[in-house]
Image (cartoon, helix red, strand yellow):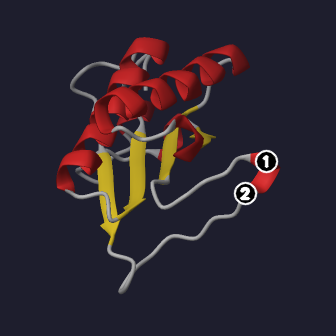
C-alpha cells in the first residue's frame, strides 16, 4: 500500500492529476500494486503562500516544472524494481503531464507492516498481511 505525496509549483489541477495518474500507473506496472490501492496527497504551490526550492544538484538542471514525488511503502523491493519504478514514473510523467524527466524528483521510503493503520485504529497488515503494498 503505497502512500504518495506530490508537490508541484503552479502546475494547475489537470497537470497535478496527470502526475498522480502517472505515479499510480507506474506503481501498478513495475511493482504490481492493485489498481484500487490509491492513496495520494497532491499539492500545487502557488509560489506566494507556498513554494518549492531546488538547485542543479548532481548536474541535473531543474526548473519551475519540478515535481517532488514522495512514496512510502512497505519494504521488500529490489534495487532493480526501484530503478524500473523511477524510470517509469519519469516516462509517464512526461507522457501524461508534459513534465520533463529532469524535473521528476522521487524519494522512496520503506517501512514495515506495523507502521500502517488503514483506518479504525487497527494495524491491518499485522492482523491479515497482504503480499502487496
Task: Tell me residue 88's x, y (percent).
Answer: 49, 22
Query: How busy is the neighbourhood of tag 1: few (under 14 within 10 Å), some, or many (20 plus)?
Result: few
Residue 2 vs residue 94, the one in the foreground: 94
Q: Viewed as shown, does residue 42 lie left or right of 129?
A: left
Residue 46 appears in which quarter of the rendering?
A: bottom left
Residue 62 vs residue 115, the one in the foreground: 62
Residue at 50% in and 70% down: 52
Depicted 44 relative to depicted 47: above or below: above
Q: CA distance from mark 1 to mark 2?
A: 5 Å
Residue 85 vs residue 94, the one in the foreground: 94
Q: Is label 1 in contact with label 2 (beta carbons under 8 Å)? A: yes
Residue 104 seen in the current view: no
Which residue does the numbered mark 1 point to in the structure image? 59
Q: Where's the N terminus, which quadrant?
A: top left
Q: Secondary structure at mark 2?
A: loop
Residue at 21% in and 26% down: 36
Label placed on residue 56: 2
Residue at 48% in and 16% down: 31
Q: Viewed as shown, does residue 93 lie left or right of 55?
A: left
Residue 50 appears in which quarter of the rendering?
A: bottom left
Amino acid at each position: 500500500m503505497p502512500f504518495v505525496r506530490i508537490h508541484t509549483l503552479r502546475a494547475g489541477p489537470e497537470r497535478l492529476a496527470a502526475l498522480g495518474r502517472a505515479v499510480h500507473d507506474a506503481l501498478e506496472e513495475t511493482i504490481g500494486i492493485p489498481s484500487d490501492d490509491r492513496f495520494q496527497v497532491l499539492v500545487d504551490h502557488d509560489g506566494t503562500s507556498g513554494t518549492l526550492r531546488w538547485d542543479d544538484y548532481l548536474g541535473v538542471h531543474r526548473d519551475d516544472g519540478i515535481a517532488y514525488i514522495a512514496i512510502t511503502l512497505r519494504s521488500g523491493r529490489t534495487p532493480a524494481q526501484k530503478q524500473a519504478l523511477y524510470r517509469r514514473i519519469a516516462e509517464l510523467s512526461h507522457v501524461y503531464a508534459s513534465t520533463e524527466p529532469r524535473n521528476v524528483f522521487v524519494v522512496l521510503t520503506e517501512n514495515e507492516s506495523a507502521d500502517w493503520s488503514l483506518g479504525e485504529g487497527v494495524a491491518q497488515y499485522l492482523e491479515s498481511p497482504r503480499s502487496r503494498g
